[in-house]
Amino acid sequence: MPRRGFSKPRLGPGGTASLAGLALSLLVHVATLRGVDVSARVPYIWLLHIGAILDYGVLILFIRKQPVGRRALNNLPRWTIVVCGALLGYVVVNSIQSLRFTGGANADVAGGQYVLTMHGRVLSQLTAQQYRTYRAYELRLFSGIWLIFFLLPSLYFAVSPPANTPAPPVARVAPPAGSGNNTPPQ
């Protein structure tokens, strides 16, 4: 029998896609923490951005269409809430650090030179190493956000109770003695 708060994972295609996106986002994020500009080696890595939005959209649609969807969200094990909260805190700190480093500017190539731009205006020229570092921080910012957008559907589809699971019983508290209500608790 599984311990309380844990259930046997039940991954369908949605859960598998969510976990794959989460794993890829985590790999990209760890690489960017090491200063690697993953987008230079894998230019299509930005498709994860679209994947994260689509994956989260599927979760929202599923929850809204299924009568059990919202109940299942409320019945997620406590550890999933802790994991989501911890990751959200990390994403906020990561975003602040990334934006402080980049200042909201983007590394770009203009006229065959590495430059730092903001809203199309060139701010300064960069060395090749600075360019790679800025690009890594840009991807670090987004890959951190992707983690949240892939984690929530992954947890929902992997550990939420199946649709045919009855709702847990609601605990009823007996009225205090002498309150004038002689109806026994049900």
Image (spheres, rainbow, N blue to C red):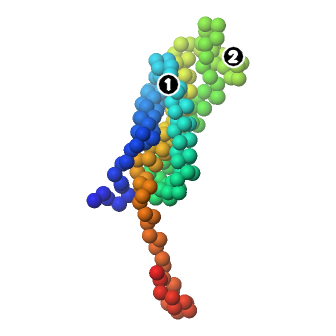
Figure check: 116 above or below 182 = above
Task: Tell me what residue is drawn at x 54 percent, y 36 percent.
Answer: 54
Q: Secondary structure at mark 1?
A: helix
Residue 13 in view (yes/no): yes
Task: Tell me what residue is drawn at x 68 percent, y 23 percent.
Answer: 118
Q: For residue 113, what is the image quadrant? A: top right
Q: Nearer the viewer, mark 2 or mark 1?
A: 1
Figure check: 111 above or below 18 = above
Figure check: 49 above or below 149 = above
Q: CA distance from mark 2 to mark 1?
A: 25 Å
Mark with earlier residue (2, 1) = 1
Q: For residue 121, what is the image quadrant? A: top right
In the image, what residue type sits under mark 2? Val
Q: Position of residue 4 (x, y in %)?
A: 35, 60
Q: Is residue 184 left or right of residue 64?
A: left
Kindly check if marks 2 and 1 are in contact, taking CB atoms under 8 A apart as contact: no
Q: Which residue is mark 2?
A: 122
What number is the disc on residue 45?
1
What number is the disc on residue 121?
none
Q: Position of residue 173 (x, y in %)?
A: 48, 79
Task: Tell me what residue is drawn at x 40 percent, y 47 percent.
Answer: 158
Task: Tell me what residue is drawn at x 36 percent, y 55 percent.
Answer: 6
